[in-house]
Amino acid sequence: MTDPSDIPRIKGAAFREFVLWYDRTHDGERLRRALARVPEAEREGLRPDAPALGVLASNWYSVALAGVLLDAVCEDRTADEQAAVARDGSRAVVDTMLTGVYRFLFERVSSPDRYARHIGRLWRQLHSTGDRKIHVTGPGEADSVIESWPGHHPLLCLVTMETMAAVYEAMRCREVTVARTACVSAGDPLCRARLRWTGPG
């Protein structure tokens, strides 16, 4: 029998904001139909008729359940379209969260070097699995690595990369670009992304 503590989970805070954003800007019925197909015993309190499907910011949710919704987002979308959803959704989530309870945390890490030093602790605020590191490799360059991540989902991986870019933009970095260079979905042993920027300032 699986120990519940071993089940990969994500925190509801960012998950909720992504669902709210998607419902406002895309086909929210797609998410509701997907959730309705999940057996009620496995929904962890979520309901298709509730705002944000009932996702609560303070709760933790299994990635398997979140994956049902993320799969629905990806369905019938090209890789470029999925990347656009990840990019736009991540920026909306970061904008919302940095005006709320996470503002205090952000102010403590609001430079590329400090963000890199604290990324492991910040990651654990939102993910129960995975080892996250950012290495600033030179002026305006950093590598992001996530390994030992059984909670991986292809779209969640994209969202993670784009969230990082959005955070750097919030730190007033300019011309921020992020490119995935490895992913477990492609058979790699870890997920890696290369970030480049100018500034901040």
Image (tube, rainbow, N blue to C red):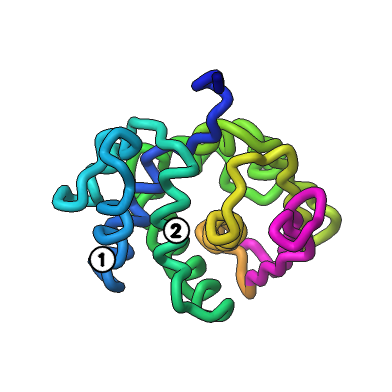
In the rendered image of this protein, does residue 104 appear above or below residue 37? Answer: above
The disc label shown at residue 194, or none: none
Q: Quadrant of residue 201?
A: bottom right
Instruction: Tell me: 200 left or right of 128.
Output: right
Quickly name the residue at label 2.
70
Which region shows up in magenta?
176-201
Q: Residue at x 35, y 31 (%)?
A: 59
The one nearer the camera, 129 or 170, is 129
Quickly name the residue at label 1.
28
Q: Identify the element where label 1 is drawn.
A: helix
Q: Residues within 10 Å of mark 1 (few under 14, many from 20)?
A: some
The one nearer the camera, 67 or 167, is 67
Q: Amino acid at mark 1?
A: Gly
Instruction: Give the residue furthest to the left.
Output: 49
Instruction: Give the residue furthest to the right.
Output: 137
Q: Residue at x 45, y 71 (%)?
A: 75
Q: Residues within 10 Å of mark 2 (few under 14, many from 20)?
A: some
Question: Is 69 included in the stretch rendered in magenta?
Answer: no
Query: Residue 80: x, y in percent?
Result: 56, 80
Q: Residue at x 48, y 78 (%)?
A: 77
Q: Residue at x 24, y 51 (%)?
A: 52
Query: Residue 122: x, y in percent?
Result: 57, 36
